């Protein structure tokens, strides 16, 4: 990792990353606590815990970005995000069909989630090719965002602000990882 970004620009980007990571960590921590206050399911606990840990990994990366060397720290952030998408893929495959969505809409959302998961795995494998990794990450974020927006719109009467924030926190996490990648990760192209 090199420092091609202007130091004042880099400082603001680090502040933005830290703020987004703190907000996401707090929101996911609240969700994790809520998960243990309701009837427990294995996928629910795993999803909440991995989402919380994903934000913690990103927060650690943002806080210690100047001290980190090599690709391993960022690789850990990307893999944590992939784990979150993988767990959500399992969870949504099980739960979405019970929400009263049509079979075709359920299939479309699950396909978006599957492609987003596969794209993040590809990011992990292609970190050194910035154009490829950026394209995969952008596609993953867009597909995850579309899927979450469809669910919010289709279930508008059942959603409230915390549910919307939790739903959108996953694409926001992906967008934050993309920002970190474009700012701090400079492979040899």
Image (cartoon, grey):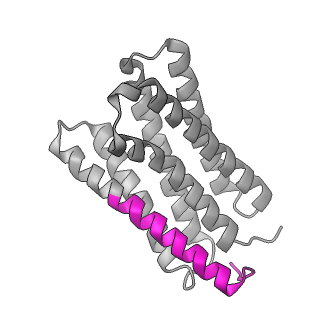
Closest to the observer, 76 or 44: 44
Q: Quadrant of the C terminus?
A: bottom right
Closest to the observer, 40 or 99: 99
Task: Kindly identify the residue that appears in the image at 73 percent across and 72 percent down.
Answer: 186
Task: Kindly identify the residue that appears in the image at 50 percent across and 80 percent down.
Answer: 64
- Residue 5 is a magenta residue: yes
The percent coordinates of residue 68 (x first, y second) are: 56, 81
The magenta stretch is 1-26
The percent coordinates of residue 37 (x first, y second) are: 16, 45
- Examine the image and state in which quarter residue 74 appears: bottom right
Q: Which SS type dominates the magenta stretch?
A: helix
The percent coordinates of residue 171 (x first, y second) are: 53, 48
The percent coordinates of residue 117 (x first, y second) are: 57, 42
Q: Is residue 4 above or below residue 102?
A: below
Q: Is residue 146 left or right of residue 64?
A: right
- Residue 7 is a magenta residue: yes
Task: Kindly identify the residue that appears in the image at 24 percent across and 45 percent down.
Answer: 35
Closest to the observer, 98 or 73: 98
Q: Is residue 11 left or right of residue 101?
A: right
Total count of labels: 0
Tell me, yes or no, if residue 122 can be seen here: yes
Q: Quadrant of the N terminus?
A: bottom right
- Examine the image and state in which quarter residue 75 appears: bottom right
Q: Is residue 38 above or below residue 158?
A: below
| Residue furthest right as drawn | 189
Q: Is residue 137 left or right of residue 36?
A: right
Q: Is residue 186 above or below residue 35?
A: below
Tell me, yes or no, if residue 129 can be seen here: no
Task: Kindly identify the residue that appears in the image at 76 percent across and 61 percent down.
Answer: 130
Q: Is residue 127 above or below residue 62?
A: above
């Amino acid at each position: 990792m090199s420092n091609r970004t202007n130091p004042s620009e880099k400082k603001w980007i680090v502040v933005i990353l830290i703020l987004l990571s703190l907000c996401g960590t707090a929101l996911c921590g609240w969700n994790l606590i809520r998960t243990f206050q309701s009837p427990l399911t294995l996928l629910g606990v795993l999803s909440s815990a991995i989402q919380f840990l994903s934000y913690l990994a990103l927060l650690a990366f943002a806080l210690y970005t100047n001290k980190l060397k090599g690709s391993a720290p960022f690789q850990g952030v990307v893999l944590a995000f992939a784990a979150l998408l993988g767990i959500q893929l399992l969870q949504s495959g099980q739960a979405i069909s019970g929400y009263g969505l049509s079979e075709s809409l359920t299939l479309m959302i699950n396909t978006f989630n599957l492609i987003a998961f596969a794209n993040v795995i590809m990011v992990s494998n292609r970190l050194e090719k910035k154009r490829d990794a950026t394209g995969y990450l952008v596609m993953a974020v867009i597909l995850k965002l579309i899927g979450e927006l469809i669910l919010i719109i289709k279930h508008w009467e059942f959603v409230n602000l915390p549910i919307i924030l939790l739903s959108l926190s996953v694409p926001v996490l992906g967008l934050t990882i993309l920002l970190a990648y474009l700012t701090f990760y400079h492979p040899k192209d």
